[in-house]
Amino acid sequence: MKKYLIGASLVALLAVPALALQHGDMHGHEAKGPTTRADVIAKVQQHFAKVDANKDGAITRAEFDAHRAAMKAEWQARRAERRAEHFAMLDTDKNGQLSKEEFSAPRAGHGEGDHHRGMHHGGMGMMGGKMRGMGMMGGDWFDRIDANKDGRVVFAEAQAIPLQMFDKADANKDGTVTPEERKAAWEKMRAEWKAR
């Protein structure tokens, strides 16, 4: 359980922490340049607004669950679309079937045998990492963020953990996390995660 929580915190740190990590993963979707504290707050606000369906300033368990279900459906639709695209790319004779030769044929830009690796990961390569986000994380996200346990997550609660993670990564405390600070924080947290 500790490894999972550290991993989730790590994703929060590296993905321009947003309302429970919705768009971040460890496969190329984290922030590339410097990130300010204001960036984090703005991202949390953006995601908070998406989940707060009735716009009353709080996310209820029902709103969270509905958003999570919508995210899961969207992810599954994208996954199916990518699988279909990948299959069509491999099916060079367009007969709706893959022969051993089609499946094994090397593709431009890929090493031999690597061209179909994404298909083994649900047709999206490592995009499954996005499942870690708020939409997919499940009830434990809600329970951890709902600090006062009143069944509602207000904005102050939603931004608390991302800002804590930001502050840990901001080594020189200048209000900006550079790519170097982000990398150092990632390496430190990864080492701690492996040690547990």
Image (cartoon, helix red, strand yellow):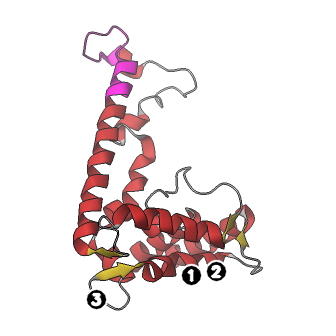
Front tag of 3 and 1: 3
Magenta segment includes 89: yes
Q: As displayed, is residue 79 above or below residue 1?
A: above
Label 1 CA crowd tier, 10 Å (few <14, some 14–19, many 20+): some
Residue type at mark 1?
Answer: Gln
Looking at this view, is 88 or 42 the one in front? Answer: 42
Disc 1 to disc 2: CB gap under 8 Å: yes
Labels 3 and 1: the sequence-earlier one: 3
Q: Position of residue 128 (x, y in %)?
A: 38, 50
In what element is the residue under mark 2?
helix
Looking at this view, is 45 or 54 the one in front? Answer: 54
Label 2 CA crowd tier, 10 Å (few <14, some 14–19, many 20+): some
Residue at figure coordinates x 26%, y 48% from the top left: 73
Residue 161 can be seen in this image? yes
- The residue beneath circle 2 is 167
Q: Position of residue 91 (x, y in %)?
A: 34, 16
Q: Which mark is residue 20?
A: none
Looking at this view, is 27 or 20 the one in front? Answer: 20
Residue at figure coordinates x 37%, y 26% from the top left: 85
Residue type at mark 3?
Answer: Asp
The magenta region covers 84-101
In what element is the residue under mark 1?
helix
Query: Separation of disc 1 and disc 2 at Cα?
Result: 5 Å
- The residue beneath circle 1 is 164
Q: Is residue 29 left or right of residue 180?
A: left
Name the quadrant containing residue 93: top left
- The residue beneath circle 3 is 150
Front tag of 3 and 2: 3
